[in-house]
Amino acid sequence: MGRFVLLVIALFILIGLVRGALKFGRRGAPEARAADGASELVRCAHCGVHVPRGEAQLADGRSYCSEAHRRLGARD
């Protein structure tokens, strides 16, 4: 009876490890996700709000959170 309980516990641990490894494989490594630039945040030069690089408005080498702030320019 004791061996059976240990075998069941070991089986559950093994299943958990395999599921975790498969889940990590689908998501990819954190470095790989950040490398595409989609999740990288940039700071608005006007108000300081952080927005994803893909959604930012760019002008004169600076990033802005919106078209209105791009027109207003950087706040110094």
Image (spheres, grey):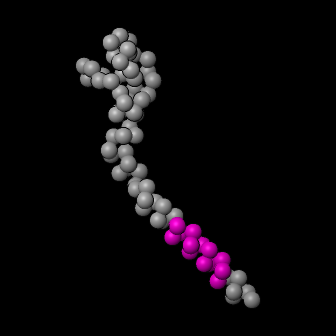
**Which residues fall within the magenta stretch?**
7-19
The residue furthest right is: 1
The residue drawn where x is 38% and y is 37% is 40
* 44 vs 65, nearest the viewer: 65
Residue 74 visible in the displayed image: no
Residue 71 visible in the displayed image: yes
Residue 62 placement (x, y as % from top left): 30, 22
Residue 7 placement (x, y as % from top left): 64, 83
Vertical position of residue 69 compared to residue 41: above or below: above
Quarter of the figure with residue 26 = bottom left
Vertical position of residue 47 compared to residue 8: above or below: above
The residue furthest left is: 60
* 58 vs 3, nearest the viewer: 58
The residue drawn where x is 39% and y is 33% is 52
Vertical position of residue 7 compared to residue 29: above or below: below
The rendered magenta stretch, by its main secondary structure, is classed as: helix
Residue 24 placement (x, y as % from top left): 46, 60
The stretch drawn in magenta includes residue 58: no
Vertical position of residue 60 compared to residue 13: above or below: above
Q: How many marks overall?
A: 0
Quarter of the figure with residue 66 = top left
Residue 10 placement (x, y as % from top left): 62, 78
The residue drawn where x is 41% and y is 51% is 30
The stretch drawn in magenta includes residue 9: yes
The residue drawn where x is 69% and y is 88% is 3
Q: Quadrant of the N terminus?
A: bottom right
Q: Quadrant of the C terminus?
A: top left
